[in-house]
Amino acid sequence: MRVAFVHYHVKAGGVTRVMENALLGLGKTGSDFEVVVLSGHEPPENCVLPVKVVDGLGYVDAASGVDSVLLADRMEEAVKSQLGALPDVWHIHNSTLGKNPSTADAIAELAKRGYHLVLQIHDFAEDGRPANYRLRQGALQSPSAYPTGDRIHYVVLNRRDYKVLKLAGISENHLHWLPNPVAMPEFDDDPVVNTTTGPEELVVYPVRAVRRKNFGELLLHAALGHKRRSYVTTLGTTSGDFVDEYQQWQEFSRELGLMVDFGVCERFEFSFPTLIDRAYCIITTSVAEGFGLGFLEPWMFGKTLVGRDLPEISEDFKSFGVQLDQLYSGIDIPIDTFRFDEFRSRLARMMEQFQASYGLVYDASGADLWVEHAVSDFKIDFAKLDEIAQREIIEKVQASPDLQKSVGSQVNFEIEPAEHVDANATIIQNELSIPKYGDRLQQIYETNLSGGSDNQQIEFADSDMILEAFIGYERFLPLRS
């Protein structure tokens, strides 16, 4: 089977890692696959993928985008030059993301030419990426960025996204849930040893600093008054939009004397394995994830995961048998703990600005509906607040034993038994292995190839419904605005 993978670039990490694992998995199926990877940019020197560069496929703005028909022609020629023939299946990653104004229409053009397409969505422009959305919509010639037809199948990372695309009109027969493979972490240093004893309980948050990781909640934990517990994050920020806020969190933590150290793997000469080895447990406080690797890797490290659950993501892993009962679904804070009326005013402005960023007109009742949905029994989940309100609460909690007790009673930092940790790791290794990923992917290709006529009728899913599914008032989070 000839397969053409398509992505804007092949830089290290992210989608590139997924494509690398896909090739590894397909190689373990026992079937013959000829593969080429089309990229809009030259690959790095250490790239292991069979890359063919296509001019005009990479990240560009509206002014520098190429004609979509021309781009589709170039993609065809690139595959033929590499494989000697056109592909049986085009496996295209994030074509709807809006990183290139020509891509969505180029994919629609390939669909009109009768190809079998597998469109894998890792991220949605509709999900907190308004600039990408505007770029895509401003250049789009097709009725939407989501073509449908007998030979077009969609692949998503989680069941939440599956439900969104189904709601938009994509048939379940053409929808596939394909969770990413999770490989056992490879360390250059000595293997990680599960040692959790020491003079203090070191809680590690292994993340790159971005706003949705909800650093305020990490500081809230640090304000609970546990004398033997300290917290570290691993990496600083590379997001220009978060630099100032990241610095403010560091300064705020120092002012309060909280036991939190930021970006330690960038600031000190010790390895990530050493840090994980030393960890009492791993924490997550994130308010949003795509795949949710953070719910899986800690068990592979031999560590307990604590912190915030995201059921719409973690339910996928629970369906395999991964046990995550120790996570909390929220931290309820009495609204009289902070200046709620001021927050309510900021909320309305944030919602209006967020709607405007997508080219929508704000409904003045949105903030009232949000409050009605978010506040229960005069309490609100800490993660639904903005940084200003979060800082007010952290200061109050640090100064109040009663608040420390009420907040502390909602979280669990107990280390899970070794057999529980091992059981989770075994499930992850079995269900999310690279060979199993290859088998699932091959089945998707075969299902795609088994249906459809040469003259498939191209229609389009309702992209407005996809947008509404992601930016409806009940889903709004200040930390993602």
Image (cartoon, rainbow, N blue to C red):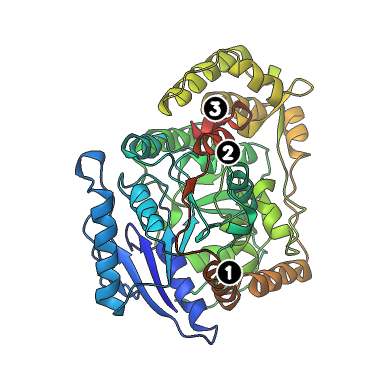
Q: Secondary structure at mark 3?
A: loop
Q: Residue furthest toward the bottom? A: 30
Using the rendered image of the protein, determine whether residue 310 is visible from the camera's viewpoint: no
Q: Secondary structure at mark 1?
A: helix
Label 3 crowd (10 A; few <14 / some 14-19 / many >=20): many
The quarter of the picture where residue 244 lies is top left
Horizontal arrangement in the rendering, residue 352 relative to residue 51 (left or right):
right
Q: Secondary structure at mark 2?
A: helix
Horizontal arrangement in the rendering, residue 441 relative to residue 264 (left or right):
right
Q: Nearer the viewer, residue 268 or 319?
A: 319
Q: Is residue 93 above or below residue 335?
A: below
For the point 50% across and 18% down, the residue is 362
Q: Is residue 124 above or below residue 20?
A: above
In the image, what residue type sits under mark 1? Thr
Residue 434, x across and y down, in percent = 55, 75
Q: From mark 3 to mark 1, how far is it between C-alphas?
A: 45 Å
For the point 31% across and 44% down, the residue is 101
Q: For the N terminus, which image quadrant?
A: bottom left
| Mark drawn on residue 447 | 1
Q: Is residue 448 above or below residue 188?
A: above
Q: From mark 3 to mark 2, how far is it between C-alphas?
A: 14 Å
Q: Nearer the viewer, residue 305 or 270?
A: 305
Q: Which residue is the site of mark 2?
A: 219
Q: Residue furthest toward the front? A: 455
Q: Which residue is the site of mark 3?
A: 386
Using the rendered image of the protein, determine whether residue 111 is visible from the camera's viewpoint: yes
For the point 70% across and 70% down, the residue is 427
Residue 305, x across and y down, in percent = 67, 57
Question: Which sits earlier in the primary sequence, circle 2 or circle 1?
Answer: 2
Label 2 crowd (10 A; few <14 / some 14-19 / many >=20): many
